[in-house]
Amino acid sequence: MPLTFETFGNIFFETFLFIDWLTELLKMVYGVDAAGDLAWMVYTTFSFATLVLFLRFCTFMAIATPGGGSIVPVVCGCLIPSFMVPEAVVSKDNEKPTAALLGLPVCSAFVMLYGDPEYLKQFGPVHNRLAALQLVFEDLPDLIFDLIILTNVSDDEKGTVWFVLSLAWSVAGFVGVCATCTKGLMKDDGTLASKPPATPVGRPTSGP
């Protein structure tokens, strides 16, 4: 697959998910003491980050597993709403290990890099819905909680660096996921601006 700007963006987003979870883990290990009475926020954001990765894995397992569209959500405690897996994506052709790899951190980035564009294009709606899920359950709460903790903790407190790092990463993730969700929604609605056709070199664009 050629490394276009869109492909690079997809690879970055897939890698971002794992790094985001890793920052939450480091925050919980090294920054929970600095949070003091607000430590529950640290555990909450880590739980949300883990939940998003778990739902992502289960969603693509539902696509890759024969009959998984109905079995996997039940096994996972109905955590996957039916709208997360569009009917058009559930087919015999997609019951492949490659579809399951799209739900694994880091591996999904390599699938985006090496995969067939036509095969990967059909998973666009799934990625958009998972991105919206991440925005609501991970990026937005993480952004709010980090701001609250940083405004209530002394700068000299040991471990605050992890909250600063997490906040910066959350802002980048929030903006990136908003852009991804907006572009995906506009593309599905047919309202996304299309590139004008290229003008042949040497041919005048106007005049007699």
Image: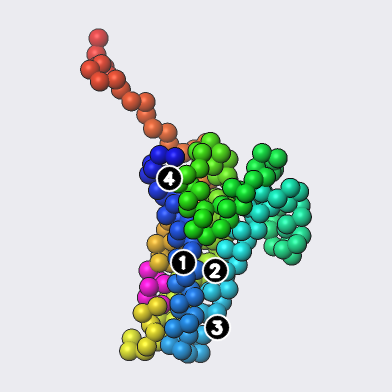
CA neighbours of label 4 inside 10 A, class few (<14), some (14 to 19), many (20+): some
Query: Label for residue 40?
Result: 3
Quarter of the rendering occupied by the N terminus: top left
First of labels 1, 2 by sequence position: 1
Mark 4 in CB contact with mark 1 (< 8 angstroms): no
**Front residue of 182 and 96:** 96
Q: Amino acid at mark 2?
A: Ala
Q: Amino acid at mark 4?
A: Thr
CA neighbours of label 1 inside 10 A, class few (<14), some (14 to 19), many (20+): some
First of labels 2, 3 by sequence position: 3
Q: Secondary structure at mark 4?
A: helix
Say left or right for 72 vs 139: right
First of labels 3, 4 by sequence position: 4
Q: Amino acid at mark 1?
A: Asp
- Cα separation, mark 1 vs mark 2, equals 8 Å
Instruction: Specify start and end residues of the magenta stretch as a single range.
Output: 163-168
- Cα separation, mark 2 vs mark 3, equals 14 Å
Q: Amino acid at mark 3?
A: Trp
First of labels 1, 3 by sequence position: 1
Q: Relative to 41, is 108 above or below? A: above
Query: Label for residue 7?
Result: 4
Residue, disc 1: 20
Residue located 66% across and 54% down the image: 61
**Front residue of 42 and 7:** 7
First of labels 2, 4 by sequence position: 4
Which is in the foreground here, disc 2 or disc 4?
Answer: 4
Q: Secondary structure at mark 3?
A: helix
